[in-house]
Image (cartoon, rainbow, N blue to C red):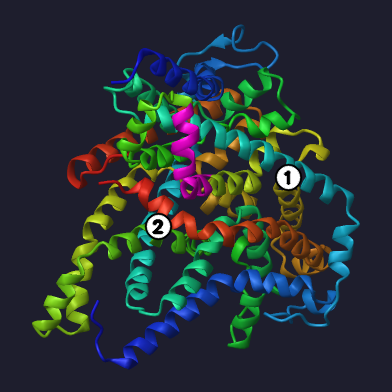
Amino acid sequence: MIRGTNRTVDIVIYCILTVIAFLSLAPVLNTLAISFSGKVAAMSGQVFFWPVDFNLEAYKSVISDRSFFTSFGVSVKRVLLGGAINLLVTVLMAYPLSKSNKHFPGRNIYMWFVIFCMLFNGGLIPWYMTINTYGLLDSIWALVLPTAVPVFNVILLMNFFKGVPKELEEAAGMDGAGAWRTLVTIYIPISLPSLATVTLFSVVGHWNAFFDGMILMNHKENWPLQTYIQQLIISVNSIMNTTDPEEVKRLSNMSSQLLNAAKVMVSMIPIMLIYPFLQRYFVSGIVLGAVKE
Amino acid sequence: MRSRASIWNYHLMLLPGILLLIAFSVVPMFGIVIAFQDFQPTLGIFHSDWVGWENFEYMFSLPDSRLILGNTLSIALMKIIAGLTVPFVFALLFHEVANIKFKRTIQTIVYLPHFMSWVILSGVLINLLSLDGIINQMIQWFGGDPIMFLQSNHWFRFVIVSSDVWKEFGFNTIIYIAALTSINTNLYEAAAIDGANRFQRLTNITIPGLMTTVILLATLSLGNVLNAGFEQILNLYNPIVYESGDIIDTYVYRSGLLEIQYGLATAVGLLKSVVSFVLIAASYGLAARFANYRIF
């Protein structure tokens, strides 16, 4: 693209984008600064983007909080188990569905079935009662199995598989490779960036889910981390339900805002760790899968 | 041509996924019959009394129904409009930048909130918007009175919509940025030779080049007008702001699982599912016809 010589416009655009980027992170930076601040400074609203009265008290109490780590463990287990099942199911469904109806009669029937399941559902109550009937309440499987088929990811990967050159598959077929062998030796190695994208999505989805933990896990020790944090935050928020400003001020001073800030930060760490590695893949992954033609 | 053996293998590969979908998507659909029952948990689906359309009639007679539908529609529509325009403007600005390193950094930062959960972000927002939070500190610094954003029916929707834009605008620009990179660069060269300035190139090439994408996204968003954001609202609302913030999904959750009115909640949920299904099917139909869009 040929650029104008107008430097001022360029400078203004750079400034605006820098401000937008800063605003995107500002709320998180504020919470991070609070989590490292002293109690008095944090409660009286003196902390902006830099800790005031720096200390690690909040993090020390997070480390000594057993139920935080129990929930952290449930989440890790859920991400590993759920992520692996999601990936396996996605690959196994995307490959046959990427074939044309001519090569795989029945493909369209499966496709309509999958789409129907994506668009229509029975609603919350029947869903809850079904899982209850299966006896999965309070089991890790209740967090993993209902979302085992990530239909959106299946469609993303299917659209990617469609773009794999047919010559490769034909050559493999000549050499006597069957469907399974072709999938494992040709399709999977060639689509690692797409697999990274769908894995990122399902891992983030599992890590961030709180609602299923909240309604399907009756015992605290089975809560995933987000459910645990949600319950903390809700309890802080609900004592704020009174409309009398003085009362709100008094109550919010009693709440463990500081501690929650530290917990919120710790629970962000896993996402922050994997995100930079997978980030470069997902842009091309999404675009390839979402906007065909 | 594929052999018979590999077609069987295809069926075999699909088997686990299909079974899981049957177990966790199709079976719950049969639970919809609860909407037509006076459902008693102790009696179960098979022994509860049938009441026909009574749950639906009761639903329409509730004064809350109109409020909840109004809240859902207005929050969802505001989100759709803001969610189309903010990323559009951002993508246009972004496109004007030549420095690749700067672009990468900006992208990485603005995509990030999309990957954080509403639980985490509501923790962050409650911090930010509390009476002692940073925003009220700034308001007071400018001489204003502090505002209880999350306890005010006047401000609540504004907080919901703007925090949603804040979380998702970066991620939503991905499609626009992809569309921008597919615009033929020869057009810009030709325009430059004809003496078009930067602003003229923007209005004559870049914006028209994005219009199909805008129309496509707008069409597809039609299917979403009954989804105002369950997780976000559940984590940010409280009884004081039910009046302005209670949406269909939060109402179903409260009346169903907390107040154990299974029949009513299922009826509300069913109505929402059916209407959403029709809207999504219609919007995909429109997108296929006018924007040549196919999901598969």
* Chain that bears disc 2: B
For the residue labelled by badge 1, is the local secondary structure a helix, a strand or a loop?
helix
Instruction: Look at the picture and state if B29 lies above or below B190.
Output: above
Please give the label number shown on residue B78.
2
Q: How many marks?
A: 2
- Point out the stretch of residues depicted in magenta: A181-198
Residue B100 visible in image: yes
Q: Position of residue A161 (x, y in %)?
A: 38, 39
Q: Residues within 10 Å of mark 2 (few under 14, many from 20)?
A: some
Three-letter amino acid code of the residue under disc 2: Met
Three-letter amino acid code of the residue under disc 1: Val
* Chain that bears disc 1: A
Q: Residue furthest top?
A: B47
For the residue labelled by badge 2, is the local secondary structure a helix, a strand or a loop?
helix
Residue B60 visible in image: no
Identify which residue is drawn at 35% across, 68% down.
Answer: B91
Q: Residues within 10 Å of mark 1 (few under 14, many from 20)?
A: some
On the rendered image, what quadrant is the N terminus of chain B found in?
top left
Identify which residue is drawn at 91% across, 57% down.
Answer: A64
Name the chief secondary structure element in magenta: helix
Horizontally, is B285 left or right of A177 in the view?
Answer: left
Horizontally, is B188 left or right of A106 in the view?
Answer: left
In the picture of the structure, the residue carrying the numbered disc 1 is A76
Identify which residue is drawn at 49% across, 47% down.
Answer: A192
Q: Position of residue A79 (x, y in %)?
A: 67, 42
